[in-house]
Image (cartoon, rainbow, N blue to C red):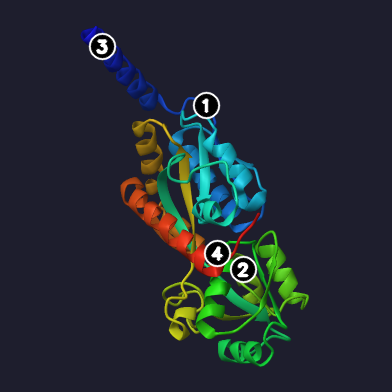
Amino acid sequence: MRRRMMLLSLSALVATRARAQSYPTRPVRFLVPFIPGSAPDVIARQIAERLSPALGQPVVVENRPGSGGNIGFTHGARAANDGYTLILGTNSLVINPALYARVEYDPLADFIPVHLPFAMPHLLAVSAEAGPRDLAALVALLKAEPGRHNYASGGNGSGAHLAAELLKSRAGVEAVHVPYRGAPDIINAVLGNQVLFGLPTMSTAMPLVTAGRLRAIAVTSPQRSPALPDVPTLAEHYPGAEVVSWFAVMVPAGTPAPIVARVDAAIRGLFADQAWVARMTADGTIAVNMGHEEFAGYYRGEAAKWAELVRLSGARVE
């Protein structure tokens, strides 16, 4: 009996390796839990376009937005673990279990982190026409008129929301949170003077900063962005106020290790195209190119870090 079990296990291993070696033999779905045109969607489409020839099969983006990413993440967690569903993971994947009263996935048990290609800071942005001139002026206004002014984020518990809550905590100010669906809506709210400030992702906001319609008064990255070298970081004024959103490729738990390695290597290879990397980072996006093994450790740390930030912010969605 024992010999038979060993033979069956060996046969299964050989079959798995054979499937991995021929992978993929049909189109691969790239599940994006956010709306078309959002920063995660834009980055996913850039990756998919170049990953298709690298894998030898079409990589097709499928948007499944809703509930702060939970709908798409749940769908991804339940997908077949055969390598034919990739999931665009963001900070929300590890934030939401601490934020929502109930989610239908476990960020650590239900997903394998494959590769972390890019990350992106947020901009603390105001209207160029009506907003404060700099961060000091914004904080002074909020202190002078506590609770009177609104700010926009991409939703409860989003990176933008938690960055603003960190600012409020560090600066000792009050402002009313108004959640929106994503960066384009944040920008419209700021330009329409519906809110005093917002924290859109940098890539989405940069064209309007360049056009002179938005004023960037701080970035949320640990260091100043080469795209906006004269704009200070929040952390320069308030140590610890650092929030960077990341965009990663995940697969459902149980996906064979050789397939994980194949996708990881294919994404790593994309970074050999320096012209593409330069285009991707011209708007402030950060090229990370973190492979599976390193990303797995980073991902576990992120889950703990963001859960603590949610707790400190007091944010909750029932």
Disc 4 target residue: 159
> CA separation, marks 3 and 1?
30 Å
> CA separation, marks 4 and 1?
35 Å
Name above or below for residue 142 compared with residue 247: below
Amino acid of disc 4: Gly
Disc 3 target residue: 7
Confirm or deny contact between disc 2 and disc 4 (CB under 8 A): no
Confirm or deny contact between disc 4 and disc 1 (CB under 8 A): no
Amino acid of disc 1: Arg
Quadrant showing the N terminus: top left
Q: Position of residue 65 (x, y in %)?
A: 66, 47
- Of helix, strand and loop, which one carries label 1? loop
Amino acid of disc 2: Pro
Name the disc covering residue 200, or none: 2
Which picture quadrant has residue 124?
bottom right
Q: Answer with mark 2 or mark 4, whichever residue precedes in sequence.
A: 4
Residue displayed at 55% across by 38% down: 76
Disc 3 residue crowd, few under 14, some 14–19, many 20+, Cα 10 Å: few
Disc 1 target residue: 26
Mark 3 or 1: the one toward you: 3
Quadrant showing the C terminus: bottom right
Q: In this orientation, does residue 278 appear? A: no
Name above or below for residue 242 compared with residue 34: below
Residue displayed at 62% across by 68% down: 200
Amino acid of disc 3: Leu
Give whichever of 50, 131 is nearer the camera. Answer: 131
Disc 4 residue crowd, few under 14, some 14–19, many 20+, Cα 10 Å: many
Q: Position of residue 220 (x, y in %)?
A: 50, 73
Disc 1 residue crowd, few under 14, some 14–19, many 20+, Cα 10 Å: few
- Of helix, strand and loop, which one carries label 3? helix
